[in-house]
Structures are given as C-alpha cells and as structure tokens.
Image (cartoon, helix red, strand yellow):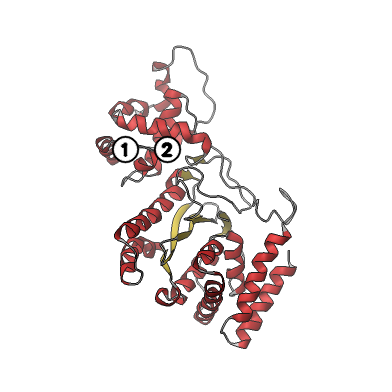
Amino acid sequence: MTGRADLPLHGGKAPRWLFRRMVELSGAISEVVIREYGREEFLKRITDPYWFQSLACTIGFDWHSSGTTTTTCGALKLALDPSELGVAVLGGKGKTSLRTPQEIEALDDVFSLRTSQLEELTYASRMSAKVDNSCIQDDYQLYHHSFFVTEDGDWGVVQQGMCSDMHMARRYHLLSDSVKDFLREPHLGVCCDRMESEVLDMTAVKSEETRKTCVDLINDDPVHLRSFFSPGGQTNLDRYLEKSLTMPSHHQVLDFDVSQSGWKTLKMAYEFQPQDFEELISLKGVGPKKIRALALVSDLIYGTEPSWEDPVKYSFAHGGKDGTPFPVDRDVYDSTLKTMDEALNMADIGEKERISALRRLHELIYDR
C-alpha cells in the first residue's frame, strides 16, 4: 500500500522529553518488525499511510498533526542503526532533505552496494520529489523528504508538502517495488479527506499524450513557443484559429509565467534532446512552471488535454470510517494493528513506556 495523507499544518516541535521516548519506542518497534518480518516488509509498512499513522500515534504524537510525519521520521532516523538492522533513514525536513544525495553516497561505507545501485537510489530520491512537487501540481510545496534504504538496495519514500494558504499538509508515500514508472501513476493508494478542485496531474494515464507532445515541443526547439506566452496572452489566440472563439471566465493558462531563465532551461533541454518525458523532467531546472507551460501549449496546439483531476482518492485498501467509498476492511485494518501489538509486546523497552503505547494502540482499535 502506498499513497498520501492530508493533515492540518501545525507549527512547533515535540518537547525533548517526548521526542527522546519516541526515538526509543519507534526504534524498538521497528527492530522487532525488521527481525521478525524482514527489511522488505518494514519498507512496505512504513510506506503504508495507515501503518505509518498507527506507528506515529503509538509512539505518542498528535494523531492528525503535520508534525506526525516529520517527527516520526526524525525519530526513526536517530533510532535505526543501518549497520545493525540493514535499514537507513536519510534526508528529513527543510535543508536536511537537500543532503539526501550526500547521505546516499555515504551508504557505500555501510552497505555493500554497487556504484550503479547508489546512482539508482540517488535518481529515485530526486525523481520522487520531482513527481510530487512538479508533476502533480496540487499547491503543496514539499518541505520534507525522508528516504528509507535497505542494504539490498530497496527503497521507500515518505515526504510531505505544505499549503500555507489552507494551513494543510499532504503526505506522499512511494515504494520501490510498486513504482514501475515514475510518470505513470506511481502512487497505488491515496489516503486523505480533502480533494482539490483543479490539479494538473502529469502522471495520470489521461496525460500520456500530453507527456509525449511536451517532449516533441522541446525537441523541436522551444524558441517558437515564445509567441504563445507574449504579453496579452490569450488575446493572440485568433492568430491560430480560423473561427471566432468565446472564452470562458477562467482558464488555467492565466496563473503561470515563464521567466527569462526559464527559457534558458528549455533551450538547454532542447540541446539535450530528451527521449521521453521522464528524461525531460529529470533535467535540472525543469520544474512546475516549465511543465505547466508545456502542458498548456500542448493542449492549445494539439488538443492533448492533460488531467486536471486531483489524484487524491479515498483509500481502497481500508475503506472509510463513514462507509465512503465502502466500509472499512476490518481484516486488513486488524492486520496492521496486530503487527503493531506484537511488536510492542516483544520490544525491549521499559514497562511504563510499553503500557502507555499499548493504551494508545487500544484507543486506535476501539475509536474506529
């Protein structure tokens, strides 16, 4: 199960006394899961938004806070010793996330990974961030990126973006075993309560023709695209259409701009001659504005309309507590809780911490 979760955006941080216990408890639970079920299973669970949420609640954090993501991942990064358990937690919040590539390189001293594997991990980290920050334009700006890696070279991503205007955060989960193509709906499951009315989703199946056309537009020299974004914008449409046109009161093309440096980036992409859309967006500097511009021109010239539907859906793995879109699948839900309960009972922690954690887990079970 991979997906997303939407959470209220809260400031501040966990108090030291609580965070210290979160590190100890999250480490103990994770160690049991890894030793009993294996590293691959741990990755599957940590990238399951429900299991992740259950872990965060069990170790003592606010159930619905945006800090659930950053604090839990921060605790796991301190708790898990890669040399002992074969799992490393890289990246983190803010500027710490930018050090992920360097931390991946440093894995060479811990795991016996080939140079090609380290390069693949660096690419996966960068592309997962690009997908959720640039290809899915939902107004949530990424500020947290945690990259989980096993000594076998498998990986999982837990990252989060914020929308300050709505005071909301959205969490994204990806798993290496489930990502066959970064640009073709890499998120298998989605968990959230809010769906935006208009989101450019370049990973949607519906956007496939738009992705191909974007590459063609770049490889055909982007200089000729300038006329589409000249001052006055849509007033020049009649230059390309023979019949009269009545414009709607709103059109997506109005909320973006391509700067002079942006045109240099597109020119650089043209000189590179990317083979496909994934190669195009992997280039440095090809971000949300350029992707949006290409998608809109593709629609204008060739009619290859991309998807404007928010990819967020209700969970299809566990269902919804109010029966939407269907009742909770108790068997799957109970499996998550059973694993957490077993891990707690087997974890090497103080009895007081164990009782407190079991009490919180009990509240999760009976508050459904």
Against 84, residue 172 (above or below) is: above
Residue 64 place in picture, x, y as percent: 61, 63
Q: Work out whether residue 12 can be spotted.
A: no
Q: Position of residue 228 (x, y in %)?
A: 37, 26
Please give the name of the residue rendered at 32% of the width and 61% of the height, measured from the top-left corner. 114
What type is the residue that disc 1 sits on?
Pro
Q: Identify residue type, mark 2.
A: Arg
Element marked by disc 1: loop
Image x and y of residue 301, in percent: 42, 23
Describe residue 73's horizontal placement relative to residue 314 as left or right: left
Circle on res. 274: 1
Between residue 212 and residue 162, name the one nearer to us: 212
User: Closest to the observer: 39 or 300?
Assistant: 39
Badge 2 crowding class, 10 Å Cα cut-off, few under 14, some 14 to 19, many 20 or more, is many
Characterize the local packing of mark 1: few (<14), some (14-19) or many (20 or more) Cα atoms within 10 angstroms: some
Which residue is found at the position 48% from the left and 50% from the top? 179
